[in-house]
Image (spheres, rainbow, N blue to C red):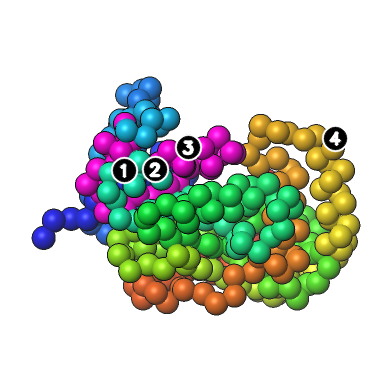
Amino acid sequence: MPQPTTAIAGATGDLGARITRALVARGASVRALVRHDAGPEVLQQVRDLGAEPAVADVSDVSSMAEACRGADCVVSALNGLRDVIVDRQSVLLDAAVAAGVPRFIPSDYSADFTTTPPGDNRNLDLRREFMGRADRAPIRVTSILNGAFMDMLGAEMPIIQPRIKRVLFWEDKDQLLDFTTKDDVAAFTAAAALDPTTPRALRISGDTLSVRDLAGTLTRTTGDRYRPLRVGSVTSLSLLIGAIRTVAPAHGEVFPAWQGMQYTRDMFSGRVQLGSLDNDRYPELTFTTVDDKFTRRELESAAR
């Protein structure tokens, strides 16, 4: 029986490389879609991941369609702003349709962006805009929604403050938050890519816990006493985001400080919580919890 073929865009990125390795581990034949101007080091990087490079013009539907032809699923792990998430992914989507690929997994990998008001979160707005485009295409689309990356707890999402042994929160320390490691997202995405029966959206969370829970977990895993610390309301955080955007708009940056604050605000508002989860869809997969993730050494390293 021939191996299923998955074409992946963004294979050399952080999450894309993890997805590629997870697909290879599952026995898939992986075709990495590579820009036509990529150097030999990129091609070698793809081969080192266990994939075969397929060189194409990422701005040309016909060229991309040829690279996608024969694949059972196209997976996007692209990362960027409108020119990537909307424009480049639209070319990839049209190419998958033109090549007759039956399934497409877009680069969502986020909290539930279907519940945020337009204009409140730039990066989630782009994903929702592309979702509208994807839902009009004659192809089966599956979004993977995973909350926040657990790997970002630390310097990139600094709600944990090891120096003062506090966990910061806005509004309510009992608001539940969803976190999933990048490796777990990659493993689940690989399983979904090889599953022809996936629904429109799949929701996963390696750990769903409140700041009160998180402080208790850190106290247990590090041996230091952590306590919740309220630093404001969701409304005050929104006002701060608006002020920072005015002073430092950072139009070309994918993750400026205010973007991370938008994500934090939406999590503490409760509106992006995932709710019913699909963690059990692939019983062979296990998920990393915050308990598993953080020892004292790992926490201090993440905060630097």
Inspect this view and state whether residue 181 appears: yes
Q: Is residue 272 above or below residue 37?
A: below
Estimate the spatial distance between the alpha carbons at disc 2 and disc 3, rounded to whole Å: 10 Å
* Of pointers 1 and 3, the one earlier in the residue sequence: 3
Inter-mark Cα distance, 1 to 2: 6 Å
* Distance CA(mark 4)–CA(mark 2): 38 Å
Whether the residues at callouts 1 and 2 have beta carbons within 8 Å, the answer is yes
Q: Which residue is mark 2?
A: 94
Q: Position of residue 294 (x, y in %)?
A: 59, 63
Magenta segment: 63-92
Q: Residue at 88% of width from left, 57% of height from top?
A: 236
65 sits to left or right of 179:
left
The amino acid pointed to by label 2 is: Asp
Image position, residue 44 (x, y; %): 30, 31
Q: Is residue 123 above or below residue 66?
A: below
In the visual, does 164 lie left or right of 34? Answer: right
Given the image, on which type of amino acid does mark 3 rest?
A: Arg
Horizontally, residue 100 falls left or right of residue 188, namely left
Q: CA distance from mark 1 to mark 3?
A: 15 Å
Task: In this rendered view, identify the residue nearer to me: 275 or 47.
Answer: 275
Marked residue nearer the N-terminal end (4 or 1): 1
Question: Between tags 1 and 3, which lies in front?
Answer: 1
Q: Dot 3 surroundings within 10 Å: few (below 14), some, or many (20 or more)?
A: some
Which residue appears at 29% of the width and 50% of the height? 101
Q: Are marks 4 and 2 in contact (CB under 8 Å)?
A: no
Check residue 223 for magenta coloring.
Answer: no
The residue mark sitting in front, 4 or 2, is 2
Quadrant housing residue 49:
top left
**Tag in front: 4 or 1:** 1
Tell whether label 4 touches label 3 (CB within 8 Å): no
Residue 88, numbered circle: 3
